[in-house]
Image (tube, helix red, strand yellow):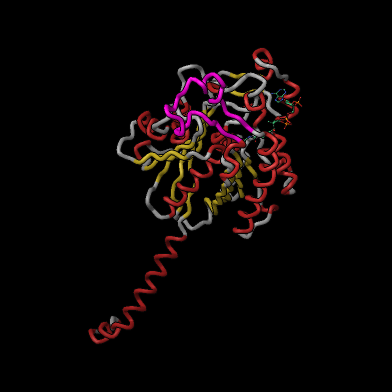
Amino acid sequence: MHIMLSLFLSQENFGFIFLYASIIIVQYRMKIRSIITGTGQFVPPKTVTNFDLEKIMNTSDEWIRQRSGISERHYAEKGIGTSDLAYKAALLAIDDAKIDKSEIDFIIAATLSPDHYFPGIGVLVQAKLGLSNIGALDVRNQCSGFIYALSVADQYIKTQTFKKILIVAAEVQSSNMDYSDEGRDIAVLFGDGGGAVILEANEKNDEKGILSTHLFSDGRYASDLWMEKPSSKDKPTFTKEYFENNRFFPRMNGRNVFINAVQKMPEAVRTALNHNGLTIEDVDHLIPHQANDRISLMVARNLRIPVEKVIRNIDRFGNTTAASIPIALDETIKQGKIKEGDIIVLTSFGSGYTWASVVIRW
Ligand code: UT7
């Protein structure tokens, strides 16, 4: 017995055993996937219809519906910040995941409209939840913010760095809209709201969870959709001139954004499907960022996916930027449309430019 053990643990065999054990460990680790265990959304109660906008600016219900498919959106009241919407969405996601908030070991928050210039909303959500001593990361990737945040969280789960991550995306955009003719293209599109998910490790090896994330950007087109001011380039940052010339409002080259959105989202979806050996026929639900209903329909046509499989709720929410995908995901789940084993593809495009895709097996 002793001789056999000595032989077994001889130097050569020891190397082999070590290698074999490493392979088993690596394989085991590779099987860990992230799964969404809870979702939530919160939009402020105040609804603003196109007819309401007609009263305060030079626009019409007909123009807005024809060009964007939007009928109404939600606006936060004065005193309500992005972190407030994020917090309420987070509570609902935590409840949905049937976990105690103390189990959350990391927060990732995405927004382009933080309560303050700094710090970001991640720490504000953390404080509202009463969770001290855990990390809170802010993601600044605008319409792609949620998918970027999900992608970061996915890596942390797969590497077993964290076990339960709160990902929250929220916007209060109504407080900084230009309702003059110069800003009306943007002002009619955007709305306020928040969406959240809880991401956890699925160690069951049942192939459920996030199958892939793909992220892209092209900063050469940053000024096609941006809020130029305030800028750290100015000394002092806040000058009288930029207040006088309304340079603190978001501005967009709508046509360029539109053309790129209808190309880049399908590209990102195809990349994701190829990566997973899937085809468009395998997709049960496509959730595109709700930028404009015409964009969603053109993405569907480009991908040749039946329009019934494309989730579209922009008519009631407008474009809620980072929050649009988690709001649409939560709504689709709560409507009972998603079945176990369904393939869900998320895709986004927006300011930066940034664009992205995610494939999830539910
Ligand atoms: O979340 C991602 C970021 N955003 C997007 O994905 C949005 C992408 N872009 C778009 O969705 C579209 O470009 C818009 C909906 C913003 C605009 O639609 P469009 O068909 O590209 O219109 P346009 O910008 O070419 O403007 C057509 C006309 C213009 O008047 P003239 O120059 O033809 O006399 C605009 O001044 O419509 C006018 N217009 C409006 N009229 C009434 C622009 N905004 C409005 C408005 N109401 N709100």
- Name the image quarter holding the N terminus: bottom left
Would you identify the image quadrant in which residue 129 lies? top left
Residue 327 visible in the current orientation: no
**Which residue is found at the position 35% from the left and 41% from the top?**
135
Outermost residue, left direction? 2
Q: Left or right: where does residue 14 sit relative to residue 260?
A: left
Relative vertical location of residue 350 with respect to residue 76 in this rendering, above or below: below
115 falls in the magenta region: no
Q: Position of residue 172 (x, y in %)?
A: 52, 26
Instruction: Indicate whether 359 appears above or below 308.
Output: below
State ligand 1's quadrant. top right
In terms of secondary structure, what is the magenta stretch mainly?
Answer: loop
Residues in magenta? 225-252
Work out whether residue 229 or residue 76 is closer to the camera in this orientation and state it. 229
Question: Is there any visible trace of residue 176 in the rendered image?
Answer: yes
**Closest to the observer: 69 or 215?**
215
Q: Which quadrant of the view contains residue 27?
A: bottom left
Task: Left or right? Give the position of 58 relative to 34.
Answer: right
249 and 71: which is toward the camera: 249
Name the spot of residue 288 as percent of width and height, x first: 63, 41
Residue at screen point 71% across, 25% down: 64
- The reply to whether the magenta stretch includes residue 240 is yes
